[in-house]
Image (cartoon, rainbow, N blue to C red):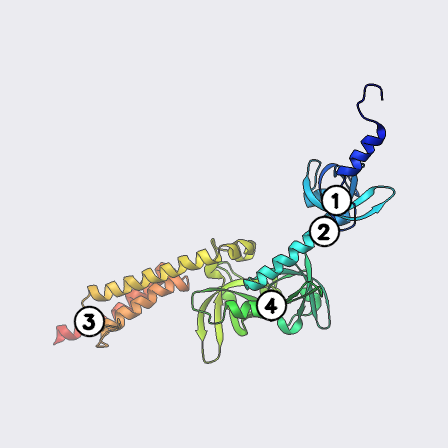
Amino acid sequence: MDGVSFTVEEFLEALDKYDFKSEVGTQVNGTVFDTDMNGALVDVTAKSSAYLPVQEACIYRVKHVAEAGIFPGFQEKFVIVGENKENGLVLGLRPIQYDLAWERCRQLQAENVVVMGKIIGGNRGGVLVVVEGLRGFVPFSQILTKSTLEELSGKELPLKFLEVDEEKSRLVLSNSKTISDSNAQPAVGSVVTGTVQSLKPYGVLINIGGLTGLLHVSQISHDHVSDVSAIFKPGDVLKVMILSHDHEKDRLSLSTKKLEPTPGDMIHNPKLVYQRAEEMAHIFLQRIAQAEAMARADILRFGLSLNSDGTSGDLDSDLVFFLLLQVCIYDIIIYNYSIFYCLILQLALFSAFHLPNYWSSRIG
């Protein structure tokens, strides 16, 4: 200690003076300087380094701290969770992340936001899901699909919060509330989220906010679908477009075919269809509006009189012809008939309605 202006005792006193509290629950700033298979060594400016076990590194289960984004140089606020002779102070990130997760869930509940929850288990009363890193419970009475626990296991459901109670560690969610809120009054042409209820030879029955919708096999994809079970399973959550709504029977006609960016995507790349569902539905509705405008323009161009509501006052043969012409235009867009087919149909309609009038005028 020759030449040093302070004694060992003074140095130890200085360390004690500026040392932080090492009580369990205290938050400290630290920098990771090394990692191994079991965790990470952290410099917390104490007399010795602290240790972050892998099981305390993340709110989610990880096998290595690197999966939680923790590498040498990583700086964060840690919480002291214990102390042992081998590693000294034991640190954790999970308690801090849990607090943030509960706060996040309270915020999402207040905003009535839809979240996705992955089903990890369950019992006779419902299923266990992971939401924002926390375990929640969804009663079977709050799940629209009638699938069994085995069929639902591993799937994701759209959910909304019913109860968020951090003190009781109680997190209760609902699948039916999510869908019923977003699709209370489904409009024709809108994109909605539904859950596959059952599979039939002629298509898929989908539950949408308590309403039953049919996704007919012909409306699944532009490519031929021979077996719906190769694409869907009970409990699957998917986006569909509403083609029609029978208000008397509360039944919906649905389509994913109209949402395909390219023919066959629903079979080969359904995720892309769901990602671009709203965009493709908007394009489809634009095409419908253009077809409607074309048909109305044709009626006006040929001198047919229209009432203020867009209908003709006299149901003569010309009006019938142009109304059927409008149907042909819709056939091209909605049912994807070929243009050649529609031209043949238009020619037949022209002959049926105009040739008799032509010959009668010639004979007269």
Q: Amino acid at mark 3?
A: Ser
Label 1, secondary structure: give it.
Answer: loop
**Mark earlier in primary sequence (3, 4):** 4
Between the residue at mark 2 and the residue at mark 4, the CA separation in whole angstroms equals 28 Å
Cβ–Cβ below 8 Å for labels 1 and 4? no
> On the picture, is 250 further left or further right than 25?
left
Residue 60 visible here: no
Q: Amino acid at mark 2?
A: Arg
**Mark earlier in primary sequence (3, 2):** 2
Please name which of the two marks, 2 or 1, marks the residue nearer to the observer: 2
Residue, far right: 85
Please name which of the two marks, 1 or 3, marks the residue nearer to the observer: 1
For residue 308, what is the image quadrant? bottom left
> On the picture, is 66 further left or further right than 351?
right
**Is residue 129 shown above or below 49?**
below
Q: Which residue has dot 1 on it?
A: 64
Between the residue at mark 1 and the residue at mark 3, the CA separation in whole angstroms equals 76 Å
Rate crowding at label 3 as few (under 14), some (14 to 19) or many (20 or more) other CA atoms within 10 Å: some
What number is the disc on residue 94?
Answer: 2
Q: Residue 295: horizontal and vertical position, in percent?
A: 28, 64
**Mark earlier in primary sequence (2, 4):** 2
Q: Residue 255: horizontal and vertical position, in percent?
A: 48, 65
Cβ–Cβ below 8 Å for labels 2 and 1? no
Q: Amino acid at mark 4?
A: Asn
